[in-house]
Amino acid sequence: MTAPKISVYSLSDLKNTTDDALPNYLTSLKFKQSHVLTDVRLALGYTAVVIAGVTFYADRRLGWDTTKYWTLWAVVAYFILNGALTYWIWGIEKGKIFTGETNDTLMMLLEITFVDTQLQVSIASSVRKHKPIYNLKVRYQRLGKEPKTLEISAPFTRWFDSDGYFVATPFQQWLASEVPIIGEADSKKVASSTKTNEQGEIEKSRENNKAGGPVSPPVNGASSSGARSRKAKKTP
């Protein structure tokens, strides 16, 4: 299946496509993703919407005089929930696109994390305005050890070709080479992580997307044949 094409001039498209690819790659390894952050955000948002909807329905059915007391408390609850949602997004999630672990147990409550696992990891992504650089902040902690924080960055052109197609291999090689815990889980990507290989994957993807199939490599004997032909012309 061909990867969807995006605009290479849209930072939001570049970031969102890369954000979606990162959890898919990690879950294909030994990591299990936790959806606690997303579940709490959705619960806060949907609860506020339900309160607003019920209040509107009650007002239309029963009238303002009957519901004004309950409407007051509904409005207060609505603003409290939206304030909590804003704090959750900017104060707790902080741009996290992946939270996971290597075992099954993980429970998070606000700023307190209870872990019964060998390794816990959280990854947050960000981009700066008008700068096509992908920034990652990786925080991981092994059982019984101090947490470690790692900040890495790379240009989007490292895993997007000029036509706007995402190429997974260079992105995975970058992660495996820069983040030790990912490199341990996918050592093959670290061993093959060279600039030449990354560029080759992007060029191959570009040709496949244009031609609709794999491109045959150049024949090794082509240049030598041409050299022999030129040499033959010089022979008297």
Image: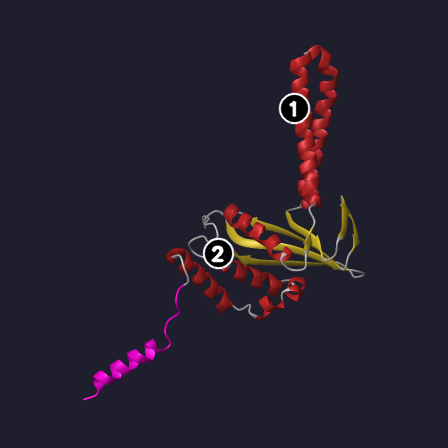
**Few, some or many residues within 10 Å of mark 1 (<14, 14–19, 20+):** few
User: Which of the pair 111/183 is nearer the observer?
Assistant: 183
Q: CA distance from mark 2 to mark 1?
A: 43 Å
Is any atom of residue 88 visible in this view?
A: no
Q: What amino acid is labelled 1 in the image? A: Gly
User: Which of the pair 135/18 is nearer the observer?
Assistant: 18
SS of the residue under disc 2 = loop
The magenta region covers: 215-236
Residue 62 falls in which quadrant of the image?
A: top right
- Residue 92's place in the image compared with 215, above or below, is above
Q: Earlier in the sequence, mark 2 or mark 1?
A: 1
Residue ID at (66%, 64%)? 185
Q: Magenta stretch: dominant SS?
A: helix
Judge left or right: residue 140 versus residue 230.
right
Judge left or right: residue 95 versus residue 145.
left
**Residue 65 x, y percent position in the rendering:** 71, 10
Residue ID at (52%, 46%)? 12
Residue 50 in magenta stretch: no
- Foreground mark, 2 or 1, reads 1
Q: Which residue is mark 2?
A: 160
- Residue 53's place in the image compared with 234, above or below, is above
SS of the residue under disc 1 = helix
**Residue 51 x, y percent position in the rendering:** 69, 26
Judge left or right: residue 142 versus residue 14.
right
Q: What amino acid is labelled 2 in the image? A: Phe
Residue 53 falls in which quadrant of the image?
A: top right
Q: Which residue is mark 1?
A: 53
